[in-house]
Image (spheres, coloured by chain):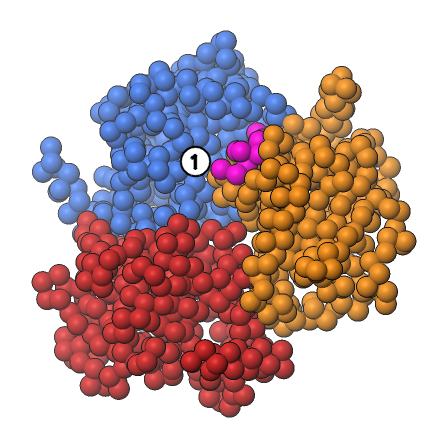
Chain colours: A red, B blue, C orange
């Protein structure tokens, strides 16, 4: 039964992920690729991705992000704002080099931790918002859609452009996109590999607000987190997880299958050749 | 097969619910908590909730509503308009006192009849519309979303604010909300426990029209019911039920599970404490 | 696993449907009810329905359409534009005479080929767009919704008005409608048997653009097909099929059941009487 499953999830998550040194929110345990700042007045934690030059989601960055999300969640912060230390790029998405002629064991670990990252963010018990202060392509966009609110700065782009490098996203990634945008828009955007400008993203609803500066974006995210003040926090967490249950179950009921299917696809000549051409194109741009 | 199941539902429903004295639409059998008026020119039945002070959905009011809906449906009315005799409150939602330190047998009956009420309204064979002439929080909003059209008067609020009293709605209640609003809006509104103003409700699509007076609201509902004049009534009923089949099946395939899950949740200290604080807050407001 | 299933579908479809004389795109094999023109500059194929007076979907026209879609797909065209040779009617929908007092074997063949047609168009590997240069009621609308983009000329109507002739559409037809429009709009429109004017269709999103002339409509469809230029074609095909997988599976997991359910319904007196009245009404209009 859904309610019991959700209640059980509350009990399970806490003891496993919460360290006894929660209040410190130290990054000592990780390699400094993320930065967590808690506003002690508002109680809101800002989690910044901090891997120059473009916050590529490497194994290490994803590991740190999961750690930080879990710590912030356990630390009873009032909310989590995901943003970037870089003022041009929110996150450039997955490290595509990991997908090119991959070592199979490493690829397995890489995809599994990406699944973990999405689950950690998508199911995060406290209110989440993304202050998108730079470009957010591919997995950068998926992470933004896993949050509950999106504020973006002008003149950047956001979207899942996987078909441009021959990638076929997993169904749970499509569902994450669909949790924010109408079905018709999602299919078309995924097929095109569309990158939306800030203005286009606002018009279709992929983002909720535009901000003039990072400070304004953080303030708007904080205001969104404030809208939950009248809600009971635990009932809120359970309600959020119920709303996201169908999407999450798509992944959880067969994580191994998603991994295998994804690895099989990545190993096809079709994908390897498409990715190779894409990586060449990126080199030439530089 | 869906079509056969739908056709069978037609056959099943009629003989069970329709009394031999349909034309009278008398409320003799019930305790007068609802009022049914049939406009003999238009053939449209107006069903008014009539339980002062705020049309709280008590066991008795829900029982009368189900009776009235069934009678109106059997009586071959051209449509059903749900409204309130009270000019401030459409319905204040479920009787929360039934959920506080509940007698288990009584709670079981209470939740079961609420399921019945939603099913009766959601699957009602004739066109339905809600003339929302007052506030419509919680189950008041769910009843409005179970209708096919919503007209609301200005300066009231509508929405499912369950998280504000620590309640976790059932999945079928979420689906009822989602049958009217986009997924993203529903998740956010449920998490916040948001009550939409009339104007906000219009903007997101939770209501279809705003009316200046109750008379105008009833006229707009009647006009909506008139839009089905070219449709074959039985094909219309079957089509409506097909469109709502997935939502209804969510409840029907495990009604006992929904009941048990809901009772388990209501009996948690989490909920009892949250509800207690909420009820105290309501007292103080008065 | 979804990805493997999708990849396998690529392999299966090609060898079966592609003739060795693809480049010719001749209609020699069919009876001339469709016309295919390939713009050798753009690589886009225009498929015109060409059965006077109103492109009624007869067995023969549907057969030709499937052949033409398969040929265009195999011929590595850059895209497919579906349109009509008639400047008043895109397609009048299914041949209702086939549903009236039907020969059972013929009805079986008729419904099966309609399923085939929807599958061929809905799963077509290359980009598809509809230049709706005339009325598009019922199955005419379903065919338009099976395309990825819709451009329509002014002063026509489009919609699934099945309830007006007592028909109950299949669930996959409803899902095809829902892949384009929000749930609330679909339920209401199906129940009403609503025919949207060009302007109304644009407002709800049933069509994407309005064009002043057929030439402009074809140009806008071609521009849409051009939006996929940066996407890898095979990754695009797989992504499209993943997005449409849930809708298609609804039909594919029990095609025989859909056929039987539909035949049972068509044979009910309810439907036969409703259809008879509708056909009489159409005669009187002439």
* Residue at the image position 66 percent from the left and 43 percent from the top: C215
Using the image, determine if residue B143 lies above or below residue C223.
Answer: above
Q: For numbered disc 1, what is the local secondary structure?
A: helix
* Residue at the image position 49 percent from the left and 53 percent from the top: A185
Q: Which one is nearer the viewer's eye here, A165 or C279?
A: A165
Q: Which one is nearer the viewer's eye here, B232 or C91?
A: C91
* Residue at the image position 23 percent from the left and 47 percent from the top: B164
Return the residue found at the far front.
C41
Image quarter of residue B116: top left
> Magenta: predominant secondary structure element?
helix
Using the image, determine if residue A54 lies above or below residue C36.
Answer: below
Q: Quadrant of the C terminus of chain B?
A: top left
**Residue C239 placement (x, y as % from top left):** 58, 64
Using the image, determine if residue B231 lies above or below residue A190.
Answer: above
**Residue B128 placement (x, y as % from top left):** 47, 27
Q: Which one is nearer the viewer's eye here, A259 or C226?
A: C226
Report whether C112 appears left or right of C202: right
Report whether A27 appears left or right of B218: left
To which chain does the residue with label 1 belong? Answer: B
Image quarter of residue A121: bottom left
Read off the magenta span. Answer: C191-203
Residue A3 within the segment the image draws in magenta: no
**Residue B223 placement (x, y as % from top left):** 47, 20
Residue linked to disc 1: B146
Label tally: 1
* Residue at the image position 41 percent from the left and 68 percent from the top: A137
């Amino acid at each position: 039964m859904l309610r019991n499953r959700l209640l059980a999830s509350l009990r399970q998550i806490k003891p496993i992920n919460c360290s006894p040194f929660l209040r410190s929110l130290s990054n000592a345990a990780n390699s400094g690729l993320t930065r967590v700042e808690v506003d002690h007045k508002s109680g809101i934690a800002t989690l910044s991705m901090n891997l120059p030059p473009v916050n590529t989601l490497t194994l290490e960055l994803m590991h740190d992000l999961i750690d930080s999300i879990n710590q912030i969640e356990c630390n009873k912060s009032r909310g989590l704002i995901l943003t970037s230390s870089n003022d041009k790029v929110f996150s450039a998405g997955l490290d595509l080099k990991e997908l090119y002629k991959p070592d199979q064991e490493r690829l397995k670990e890489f995809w599994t931790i990406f699944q973990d990252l999405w689950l950690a963010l998508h199911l995060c018990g406290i209110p989440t918002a993304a202050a998108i202060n730079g470009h957010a392509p591919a997995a950068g966009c998926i992470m933004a859609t896993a949050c509950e609110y999106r504020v973006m700065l002008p003149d950047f782009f956001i979207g899942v452009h996987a078909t441009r490098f021959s990638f076929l996203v997993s169904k749970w990634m499509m569902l994450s996109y669909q949790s924010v945008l109408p079905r018709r828009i999602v299919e078309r955007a995924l097929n095109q590999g569309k990158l939306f400008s800030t203005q286009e993203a606002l018009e279709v609803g992929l983002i909720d607000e535009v901000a003039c500066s990072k400070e304004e974006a953080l303030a708007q995210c904080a205001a969104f987190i404030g809208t939950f003040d009248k809600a009971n926090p635990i009932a809120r967490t359970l309600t959020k997880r119920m709303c996201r249950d169908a999407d999450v179950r798509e992944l959880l009921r067969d994580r191994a299958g998603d991994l295998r299917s994804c690895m099989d696809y990545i190993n096809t000549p079709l994908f390897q050749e498409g990715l190779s051409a894409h990586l060449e194109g990126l080199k030439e741009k530089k």
